[in-house]
Structures are given as C-alpha cells and as structure tokens.
Amino acid sequence: MASDLEQLCSYVNEKIDNIKKILSIRNLGQAPALKTTLSKIENEIITVNELLNHFELEIQYQEQTNKSLKELCESLEDDLKDVEHLKEHIPSYLPQVTVTQSLVNKSNLDSKEPVEAEEPVLAKKPPREQRIIKEMQFITTDEFNGVPAYMKSRLTYCQINDVIKEINKAVVSKYKIIHQPKASMSSVKRNLYQRFINEETKDTKGRYFIVEADLKDFTNLKADKRLYVILNILRHCQRLSEVRGGGLTRYVLI
C-alpha cells in the first residue's frame, strides 16, 4: 500500500513539474529581453527551411541527370550494336576500295626513291545537321528584385531558377524526340511524338512549348500551388506566355 502511494505521489509531482515548465516556457516569449532572440531564431529557421528546399531541388535535378545519362548510355550501346551489325553485313553492291600501284621496271628505279601507292579518295559524308533547341534564360537578380513581394512571397531567387532548369530539361527532352528520325523511335517515343504533334496549334507553330504532362514525364516537378506561383512569376518576367485551347495550357518560351 505504501509503495502504491509513493508511486502515485511521484506521478503527481512529475505532472506538476511539467506544468511548471510549460508555464515558464510560455512566459519566456513575453519577456522583452528575449523577443529579439526569438525573432532571430525564427529568421534562422526560415533560412534553414529555404536551404533545405534548395537542396531538395538540387537532389531531384541530379537524380534526373543520372537517369538521362543512363538512357544516353543505353542509346549509345544500341548504336554500337547497329554499327557492328553493319560492319559484319556490308552490302556486296558497294564499290570496293583498292590501292593501285603503277608497275615499273625495277632496273629503272632509283633505289633511294620509294614507290608511293596512290591513296584512294573517299567521299566525305556530309555532317548531320545539328538542331539547336531553344532554352529559357535564367532570371537575373534585378528581375527577381523587380517582382512584386505579394507575387513571390517567400520564394527565393535560386528556387525560381531551379524550376527554369527543370523546364529546360523538359523542353530539350521533348524536342529531341520531335527531331529524332521516326525509324529509330521506340514505341514509347512514337506515342510521345504523336501526343506532341496533337498538342500543337496554329498559335504554337514554329515555337517551343510544353504542357503539364511534359513536366510530369521528363522532370520531378509537381503541379502544385508553388509551381503555378513560379510560372506566374516567369510570365511576369517575360520568360513564357500561355496558349490555351482544347483543355490544355501550353507554356510557350519567349
């Protein structure tokens, strides 16, 4: 019985101590001397939170880059297999390259002058045209400072440019498929290509644009409120414009 009473007293005393601590902590914020310290702590927490957001975007970018490099490696391996196949199956109707040498009488040759073989002149294959894909320019610090505070809220300069970096990845990935010869496309890329063509309108002809589905397919960006705020900032900075129609919003690079 005495033991139970001691445990009960200990429990009650522990609860009383906790209440005293809570009351003392609540009163700390009211002390004028500590308000400045608490304000500094709050600012530090906000800075750390922004830094963590930046790290998160950078990690997402590195993961997407790693994925793209793997895809490039696989594509190069396929190209190598095609080259090896062509090397082993050269068509018989192609002209054979031979080295000719004039027959001369050895007795009339100067032993110090070597006989030179005629080198065949091979026709040079014209270089494949390299298509330049337009990318969005990063915003400058002056442009960022010119964005109204109500529009950018707590977004940072780096966070906006990180989204531009992701948008450029989507643009490049999309138009690489569009510029790729259809004969070399996989079934997945053919389906993507057809979607890209169906999404074009007379207002987007000859211009580079993406839709939300492209951001989903080629980046790790989420179509959330934060992304729409940044897209609105990019419109304000004249980096893109919108073309709506057919239930789609097309983000056109300016």
Image (cartoon, grey):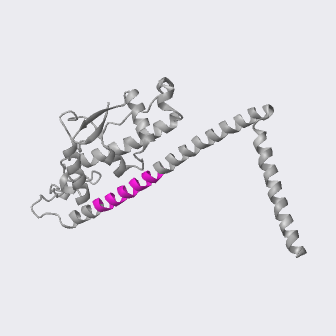
Image position of 187 with respect to 245: above or below: below
Front position in the image: 240 or 19 = 19
Quarter in which the C terminus is drawn: top left
The residue at the far right in this view is 2
Report whether residue 69 is seen.
Answer: yes
Type of secondary structure dominating the magenta stretch: helix
The residue at the far left in this view is 93
Q: Residue 76: say if magenta.
A: yes
Question: Does residue 12 appear left or right of residue 91 in this picture?
Answer: right
Quarter in which the N terminus is drawn: bottom right
The residue at the far front in this view is 1
The residue at 59%/43% (across/down) is 49
- The answer to which image quadrant residue 46 occupies is top right
Q: Residue 71: say if magenta.
A: yes
The residue at 23%/42% (across/down) is 129
- The answer to which image quadrant residue 24 occupies is top right
Front position in the image: 48 or 130 = 48
The residue at 23%/64% (across/down) is 87
Front position in the image: 132 or 41 = 41
Question: Does residue 11 appear left or right of residue 85 in this picture?
Answer: right
Can you give x and y, in whole percent of width and height, for residue 93 in the image?
9, 61
Q: Which residues are magenta?
A: 62-79
Can you give x and y, in whole percent of width and height, for residue 101 in the image?
17, 56
The residue at 18%/66% (across/down) is 89
Front position in the image: 169 or 53 = 53
Report whether residue 131 is seen.
Answer: no
Question: Does residue 94 appear left or right of residue 192 in this picture?
Answer: left
Image position of 11 with respect to 3: above or below: above
